[in-house]
Amino acid sequence: MSAHVTTHVLDAVTGAPAVGLELSLTHHTDSGLQTVATGVTDSDGRNGALGPERLDPGTYRLVFGTGAWFAAQGTPTFYPEVTIDFTVEAGRAHYHVPILLSPFAYSTYRGS
């Protein structure tokens, strides 16, 4: 079984994977945010098991624990966390949400 949402996090300064970065996936509901899954990145900066195989359509939030991760590296950062909200559409099998980090910038896109 593969997760509906996966990610890959790279440190743009060192060119290395962001190993051990904490993640959380939540779903926007009428009663607020509902936690779907939490996890950490592996030795390649990836998490391929973030949540179930299928998600209901709707808006989701993926939070990257960048402040704690940079602090563990001894690097000051401007962003205590990076939050990405995105829409899950019915029938779409997979969402890959990669992120490229530096202490004072980040970039992301919808991968495949």
Image (cartoon, helix red, strand yellow):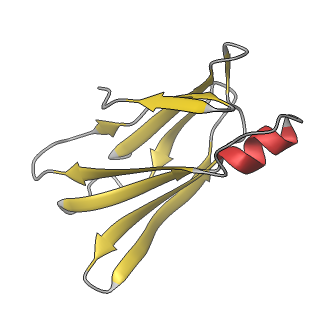
State which quadrant residue 21 falls in: top right
**Left or right: residue 36 compared with residue 90:** right
| Closer to us: 105 or 92 | 105
* Camera sees residue 65: yes
| Closer to us: 110 or 106 | 106
All told, the count of numbered labels is 0
User: Looking at the image, which residue is at 42% across and 39% down?
Assistant: 6
Quarter of the figure with the N terminus = top left
User: Measured from the top left, where is residue 40 in percent x and y?
Assistant: 64, 46
User: Measured from the top left, where is residue 34 in percent x and y?
Assistant: 40, 75
Q: Which residue reaches farthest bottom?
A: 31
Q: Which residue reaches farthest right?
A: 74
Quarter of the figure with the C terminus = top left
Q: Which residue reaches farthest top?
A: 15
User: Measured from the top left, where is residue 3 in percent x and y?
Assistant: 38, 46
Task: Indicate whether 89 appears above or below 110.
Answer: below
User: Looking at the image, which residue is at 75% across and 43% down?
Assistant: 69
User: Measured from the top left, where is residue 35 in percent x and y?
Assistant: 46, 70
